[in-house]
Amino acid sequence: MNPDLTFSSLSHSLNLTELKALMAQLAQPTALVELGLLIACLAASWLVVHLLSRRFPAAQGPQSVLLGRQVFDGLLFPVLALLLAFGARALMPVLGQPVALLRLVIPVLMSLVLIRFVARVLRAAFPNSAGTRLLERSVSWVAWMASVLWIVGALPVLLDELDHIPVRFMKQGNRIPTLADVLGDVLSVGLVMIFVLWLSSTVESRFLRGKVVDLSMRKIAVNITRTVLLVTGALVGLKTFGLDLSALSWLGGAVGVGLGFGLQKIAANYVSGFMILAERSLRIGDMVKIDNFEGRISDIKTRYTVIRALGGREAIVPNETLITNRVENLSLADPQVLVSTVVQVAYGTDLDALFPQLIDAIKQVRRVLSDPGPSVNLSNFAADGLELTCSFWISDPHNGQGGVKSEVNLAILRLLNQLEIEIPYPQRVVRTVGQGSVA
């Protein structure tokens, strides 16, 4: 490519004559007609999205691609505005009016559609990813630069020049692609992958909102669906680049060797994750205890499981560990858990009359189950008094046991105070050797 020719072509494309003519048309009174049509297009788009958001309030939110959290930050608003702007542009010659303002607005709206599409899909697919914002900014810069080049008329000339730059290291058979071809393929692959991520996020949200099967089965369906969609999107992208997919047959052998050596732990965790979800030995919401860490399973990923303790700490446990090690599941067959507390009363207390009253007092505590009901047993003849063990059942161990145990202890204390039953203090007998007296 001749650099002088390229510079000359770009300089010609940036000739101020066309820009001056465009500015002159914008200064004409006829531009007010376009301005009115543009305002009408934006108002109609806003009204449609506003009505849809009120009609389907559940479709809004940070993860919504079409509607977003508000009317303006979703994808649907710029798409509708762009379509109406195209219609208004086609209407201008019919009205006998020149097109000036809409020539500037349409590229801007197209860039906004691309930016919103990429940004909303990435936020929905990777809500906590640190690289999402960087990728959003990069796409925004490229889209706005392309819009400016289009407005000044330099984009077609730039693409024509890029079409004369061969990329020899990406030779496809007898064809040598140009830089414009490569950039077009990259854009196509990017859009395909973004669309696949959007489809995957939509399918995931629909699965997780369903009520037909339990959450674990929905989770395994989501994982399988996302994997299939991403692999399909990658294959479509490779095909778009013109790569022969049959040449990737060697990849299976390489992956097999890798799994046999360095990736065997990762593969074991992935397989273990699907086994856990399929067998339902551990389910999202179960209370489990592993390696002295007790908590509630908040999520089961394909590689690891997240266990959240009642104190807020979270443990990330590889799925293989949950398959090969001993795990205590408090919710596997029955979520009900037995909790006990101990109290002492003085010797001589009428236990036959006290036991029914203790049981009634414990039953009044909000989280205590009536079936199976609480029980009170004489567990020990202690040195200072009669030791009573009060046992009761709860069905929500994920809410913690300390609170309900405290409420039961307070109920027992109030009852003993009401009945004037003594909770004995520790007593000790001191014998003075040599004086023969006992205190």
Image (cartoon, rainbow, N blue to C red):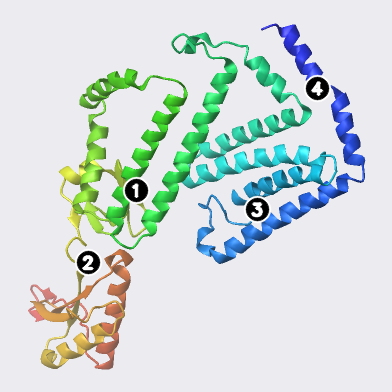
The foreground one among 294 and 414 is 294
Circles 1 and 4 in contact, beta carbons < 8 Å: no
Image coords of residue 255 (percent x, y): 27, 24
Per the model, the C-alpha gap separating discs 3 and 4 is 33 Å
Residue 335 is marked as: 2
Mark 3 or mark 4: whose residue is earlier in sequence: 4
At mark 3, the secondary structure is: loop
Image coords of residue 208 (percent x, y): 37, 56
The foreground one among 345 and 208 is 208
Residue 378, above or below 246: below
Q: Disc 2 vs disc 3: which is toward the camera?
A: 3
Residue 72 is marked as: 3
Q: Amino acid at mark 4?
A: Leu
| Relative to 132, 225 lies left or right | left
Could you say which quadrant of the image residue 409 lies in? bottom left
Mark 4 or mark 2: whose residue is earlier in sequence: 4
Q: Tell me the quarter of the image containing the C terminus.
A: bottom left
Q: Amino acid at mark 3?
A: Phe
At mark 2, the secondary structure is: loop
Q: Tell me the quarter of the image containing the N terminus.
A: top right
Which residue does the image show at 29% across and 76% down from the upper left?
367
Residue 222 is marked as: 1
Q: Amino acid at mark 2?
A: Pro
For label 1, count other residues whose C-alpha is less than 10 Å away and answer few (under 14), some (14-19) or many (20+). many
Per the model, the C-alpha gap separating discs 1 and 2 is 26 Å
At mark 1, the secondary structure is: helix
Residue at which label 4 appears: 14
